[in-house]
Amino acid sequence: MLAFTTAALALSRTTSTAGSESDFRSRVVPVLKQHCVRCHQGPKPKGSLDLTSAKGLAAGADGAPVVVPGKPRESRLIEVVSGDRPEMPKTGKPLAASEIQVLRAWIAAGAEWPASVVIKDDPLDWWSLRPVVKPRIPATSDASAGFPRTPIDAFVLAGLGSAGLRPSPEADRRTLIRRLSYDLLGLPPEADEVEAFVADTDPLAYEKLVDRLLASPHYGERWARHWLDVVHYGETHGYDKDKPRPHAWPYRDYLIRAFNEDRPYAQFVEEQLAGDALEPDSRDGIEATGFLAAGPWDFIGHAEVPETKIDGQIARNLDRDDMVTTTLNTFCSVTAQCARCHDHKFDPVTQEHYYSLQAVFAAIDRADRSYDADPQVARRRRELEARLRAIEPQPKPHEESVQTPPLGVVAERSALFAALAALPKQSVVYCGTVYSGSGAFRGTGGKPREIHVLERGDVRRPGKLVGPGALPFIKDASWQFELPAGAGEGERRIALAHWITDRRNPLTWRSIVNRVWLYHFGRGIVDSPSDFGRMGQLPTHPELLDWVAVDLRDGSQSLKRLHRMIVTSAAYRQASTSNAAAAQVDAGNSWLWRMNRSRLDAESIRDSVLAASGCLDARLFGPSFQTFVVEKPEHSPHYEYDKADPDDRRAHRRSVYRFLVRSQPDPFEQALDCADPSQIIDKRDESITALQALALLNDRFMIRMAEHLAERVRARRADLEGQVAEAVRLTLQRPSTASESKRLVPFAREFGLAETCRLLFNLNEFVYVD
């Protein structure tokens, strides 16, 4: 067994080493703190049980021990938190299986509690709010099951050892190339690619495949789609009228470019919050602020009700709330929005903190913004407009009109207007911007609105006036922004962006590492990706999370490098085959003793069907395609999906380019658990329903693509047996077996080749990664 497996159990052994105390603090203490000490602390703890110190644990409950060292099955503590209906905790969420396993392992190894560890009621003494420090990589001397390949594997092996588990063997090569292709590109590999990879004897064939996929332009499309889930991007406003946003798509294209270019993560964050202020002449700097406008917007509350009315004030308050929620959930995994009506019940976020975050966005509205994609054109336009403003005559005091300008000024003004008209036409993006409009929706023109703490979140009950700020999570740093007098509204957003990307921020780097991990393993190290607070889940591998977070933060901040470290690990390469003995210990696979099997997401299924049928249009970027026909657009548009033509070639692009409607999602994609663009989706549902099978079998898109696949294989093979074999090869990226041919060929002869292709599209092997 691995030499460091026993070291992983140090959290529960009697020892004075710093490592043991660190393990106890990082694994056991968070479980007790989240679920137990709220009631079991103080001078009169519930049941006379104090779970804040070694002395309290030793005293037990009413004089009876709650832990029997070395015997978790005989320990009352395990008994009360386990089972279908656990006795404890009395209120709040039951313990997760991984948390119970942490307590079991601790008790099994002796239940030692370092005397120096006392759980205190310190609001910042929480795993996610402690400084991110790079832990030591556990030592290992065993290479079983291909372990270890990367530092990740050492941490995974330590966790497996603490639970008495061993890793699974490596998956076969066909499985690995499919897994990599879907994870990194969201597309299936070509059958020829699979055959070449399976036959490749190069010892670095896998690593070269990873590099090739990461260099593909389709990588950006895949990971932009994940990001769009988290920021609840949509191309209609939502709410009552749900009008379209024809200029939302440049933000989506910005994401694809940023991921493909492997933008350093701090830059990626700052561009989305304040790119227009940091890079005013940059196309990316402006398009990135589509992040601030990605969510729903109340058209009636803004465009039809003035801000002087209560309903207009409510609409704008909720709009800023969405900006705060999206920003803090996305980048920091903090539920600051819980403090809109009252101080956060569980995390150290007060109403003053929350409304100071609202003050950051006090001058921002969601609207179309014109801009120049070429920085040189942008600078030239700004110079011409500045000169035009300088020569425009202004009325003198006590004069109602301006004097007629000299002929020279008139000529210069005409020349400036002509020069402006000669510049290339500007692009338009729907984004968070300083807006100066007309009618009910006017905006502020750049002057921040006054933001007050609202009692119970009621705009009719304003309290203390607040300035811009963040949260008190960075030690020795003020959470309030100290901006110079006369600072523009962009300075507020820059200050927030810098607070989020500060190297001392304990949340940002953990958050993004956890999100990337989730999309590779199907489950995050923290299984509540947007909530690292006390009501979220605890990390299964806290040391691993921190090691990778520091490696990202202090290195090049390259997400591609992070992907490479994960997918080249032995943990990622494991087979997904179950193991009855391991499942008894860890049914949820918290310790990663195998790879999690997962179904393809809705977009990957649709794109795979297009790829197999030969209809996929792989062009990148540009306006979204529509899988519906719009009726009655003048008031509340009706999005009629049943009237769209499945053979419309414009709709054969990748699903990331699909026009996303909030009120009426695409029925086909919705059946397959696509993200609801009205909600922040940090982790998609993965259901199994009869409706999914019916959609895959009977949707008009599926029927036509099956017919296109049949036409494709007919063009390649003359005989029916060969056509069926080619259809299997194109859909499943492998040769058909003799038993499959024995059943499929007669089926095709009786019902037709197109019906056989429909059948293949409905196989589990087609819709599951492995």
Image (cartoon, rainbow, N blue to C red):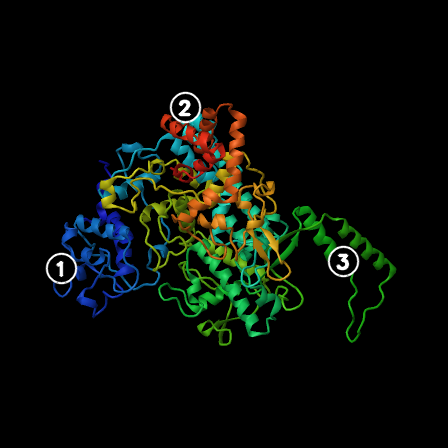
Q: Residue furthest left?
A: 63
Foreground tag (2 vs 1): 2
Residue 345 lies, with reference to residue 131, above or below; the image says: below
Foreground tag (3 vs 2): 2
Residue 622 lies, with reference to residue 320, above or below; the image says: above
Give the left or right position of residue 266, taking residue 96 as reference: right
Q: What is the x, y in percent for residue 260?
A: 53, 40
Q: Residue at the spot x=78%, y=71% of the render?
A: 396
Task: Give 391 or 173, whichever is nearer the viewer.
Answer: 173
Residue 288 lies, with reference to residue 356, above or below; the image says: above
Foreground tag (3 vs 1): 1
Q: Are marks 2 and 1 in contact (CB under 8 Å)?
A: no
How much space separates mark 3 and mark 1, taking CA atoms? 83 Å
Give the left or right position of residue 705, taking residue 122 as reference: right
Q: What is the x, y in percent for residue 91?
A: 28, 65
Earlier-in-chain disc, 3 versus 1: 1
Q: Residue at the spot x=86%, y=58% of the render?
A: 408
Q: Determine which quarter of the picture holds residue 203.
A: top left
Q: Amino acid at mark 2?
A: Ala
Q: Determine which quarter of the picture holds residue 561.
A: top left
Disc 2 is placed on an element classified as: helix
Q: Amino acid at mark 3?
A: Leu
Q: Which residue is mark 3?
A: 388
For the residue carrying disc 3, how many other residues have a C-alpha within 10 Å: few (<14), some (14-19), or many (20+)?
A: some
Q: Which residue is mark 2?
A: 199
For the residue carrying disc 2, how many other residues have a C-alpha within 10 Å: few (<14), some (14-19), or many (20+)?
A: few
Residue 88 lies, with reference to residue 590, above or below; the image says: below
Give the left or right position of residue 158, taking residue 322 as reference: left
Q: Which residue is mark 1?
A: 65
Q: Are marks 3 and 2 in contact (CB under 8 Å)?
A: no
